[in-house]
């Protein structure tokens, strides 16, 4: 074989390798042991700030029928993750005392949120609750009551932040720590609009105060669960180390820990938003431009586009969804199903989301656990053993079986081969099982469907 033939083939291989490298394969985010691309949607609310809990004047406004219809539609159109807003401006939750300290959550809040997550799990949809929005430093008190906004002190005063963490956040995080479809916690939506400089709200806080607020919440979530944490940044302008054209990176580990020096004060993945005011071929903060990849923006963690128009503008919805994938972002969540603010509708974006899912099902499709689904029949017998669940496979007697409901609550625990109570299992429609070895290592996991 002559040397020119070898060189020619080496050259061909190099060209092929360069072509593959330039294709910018999509990023993913690992959750429950699987890599997912977020093919999502913003709901983002049915009743702004009152979807869970009880407004002190209006009462409870949680609407199960709305969310049942919504999540069924998500399943039908291939949506695997939903961004849902929780406190928003604080009008209903959490509960405050007369000095602005958080005292807790009302009696309906956790049960409403539990039900919402359960409906989503039944439809194979993950949920990313967004705790706060920059609306917390606006003033909606005339229309929505005395707690609707004007909460800059919750950000500025670390003692008040701590009251929120201890009395509202930690109870939430602990309750849903094992909830199979709670994908991640988002601390705040578009906090830059509350920050001195870019801010547009009635009240404003310093960048350091906002960073400390977010860092304290991130730390608490990481201390009390294994769930991921993110922030919904308004724009790449404030969320990139590529300067210029970006101005700063408020959400890097460095910036957060400079404001609150704790090792668990970090984000697990980034989230940026896009609207057409950011479009400009020269300086635009635009994740959809050809060549303006996640790598170009020097994003050192997986990054999703958490908001983008759910209607045609500078790009069609199909272009935004496909360009996000080609540019190496980890997902996209168009705005919106029910915001009714002129930036897009479900009907405008659902077909494009379905088409993307159909083309990429292996990285989109979600189920509450990773590996297998077992169907068992309800009958009159009150006892059963591991063989009833795992036949024809056999389990060592020193293995432990734990069965959880879809909200992560332990339903039953026992040793393999020992009799377990069937009635505890068959009172549910869907359950999650885990089998661990004597050393606590996970041996098997999956879903139980009760027929």
Image (cartoon, helix red, strand yellow):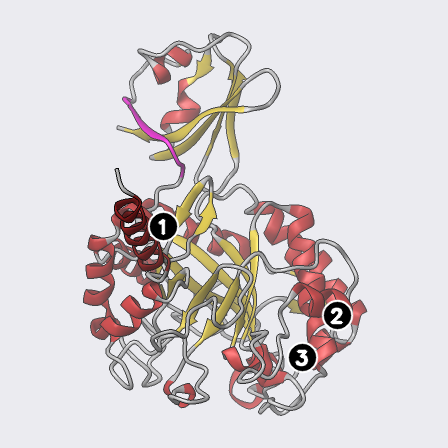
Q: Is residue 421 above or below residue 336?
A: above
Q: Is residue 110 left or right of residue 123?
A: right
Q: CA distance from mark 3 to mark 2?
A: 10 Å
| Nearer the observer, 194 or 357 | 357
The residue carrying mark 1 is 119
Q: Are marks 3 and 1 in contact (CB under 8 Å)?
A: no
Query: Which percent across, then down, holds residue 13?
Result: 31, 50
Q: Are marks 3 and 2 in contact (CB under 8 Å)?
A: no
Task: Give the Cα distance between marks 3 and 1.
Answer: 32 Å
Q: Earlier in the sequence, mark 3 or mark 1?
A: 1
Mark 2 neighbour density, 10 Å: few (under 14) some (14–19) many (20 or more): many
Rendered location of residue 275, percent (x, y): 39, 83
The residue tagged 2 is 101
The part of the chain drawn in magenta is 369-377
Residue 91 in view here: no
Q: Dividing the image into 4 quarters, which one contains the N terminus?
A: top left
Image position, residue 372 (x, y; %): 34, 29
Residue at 77% across, 68% down: 258
């Amino acid at each position: 074989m002559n040397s020119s033939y070898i060189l020619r083939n080496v050259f061909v291989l190099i060209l092929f390798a360069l072509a593959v490298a330039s294709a910018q394969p999509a990023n993913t985010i690992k959750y429950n042991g699987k890599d997912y691309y977020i093919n999502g949607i913003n709901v983002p609310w049915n009743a702004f700030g009152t979807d869970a809990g009880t407004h002190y004047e209006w009462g409870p406004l949680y609407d199960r029928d709305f969310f049942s219809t919504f999540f069924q539609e998500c399943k039908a159109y291939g949506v695997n993750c939903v961004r849902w807003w929780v406190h928003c401006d604080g009008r209903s939750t959490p509960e405050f005392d007369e000095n602005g300290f958080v005292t807790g959550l009302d009696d309906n809040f956790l049960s409403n949120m539990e039900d919402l997550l359960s409906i989503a799990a039944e439809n194979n949809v993950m949920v990313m609750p967004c705790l706060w929005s920059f609306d917390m430093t606006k003033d909606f008190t005339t229309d929505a009551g005395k707690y609707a906004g004007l909460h800059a002190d919750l950000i500025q005063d670390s003692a008040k932040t701590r009251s929120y963490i201890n009395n509202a956040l930690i109870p939430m995080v602990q309750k849903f720590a094992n909830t199979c479809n709670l994908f991640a916690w988002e601390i705040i939506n578009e906090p830059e609009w509350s920050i001195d400089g870019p801010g547009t709200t009635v009240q404003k806080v310093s960048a350091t105060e906002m960073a400390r607020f977010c860092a304290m919440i991130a730390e608490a979530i990481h201390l009390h669960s294994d769930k991921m944490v993110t922030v919904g940044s308004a724009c790449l302008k404030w969320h990139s180390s590529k300067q210029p054209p970006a101005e700063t990176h408020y959400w890097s580990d460095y910036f957060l820990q400079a404001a609150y020096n704790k090792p668990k004060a970090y984000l697990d993945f980034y989230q940026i938003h896009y609207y057409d005011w950011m479009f400009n071929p020269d300086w635009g903060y635009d994740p959809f431009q050809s060549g303006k990849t996640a790598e170009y923006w020097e994003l050192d963690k997986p990054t999703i586009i958490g908001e983008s128009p759910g209607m045609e503008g500078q790009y069609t919805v199909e272009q935004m969804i496909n360009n996000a994938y080609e540019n190496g972002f980890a997902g996209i969540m168009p705005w919106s199903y029910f915001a009714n603010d002129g930036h897009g509708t479900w009907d405008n974006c659902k077909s494009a989301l379905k088409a993307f899912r159909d083309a990429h099902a292996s990285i989109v499709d979600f189920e509450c656990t990773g590996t297998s689904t077992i169907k068992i029949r309800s009958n009159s017998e009150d006892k059963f053993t591991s063989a009833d669940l795992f036949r024809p496979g056999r389990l060592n007697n020193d293995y432990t079986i734990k069965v959880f409901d879809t909200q992560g609550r332990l339903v039953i625990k026992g040793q393999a081969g020992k009799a377990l109570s069937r009635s505890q299992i068959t009172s549910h429609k869907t359950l999650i099982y885990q089998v661990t070895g004597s050393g606590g290592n996970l041996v098997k996991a999956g879903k139980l469907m009760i027929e």
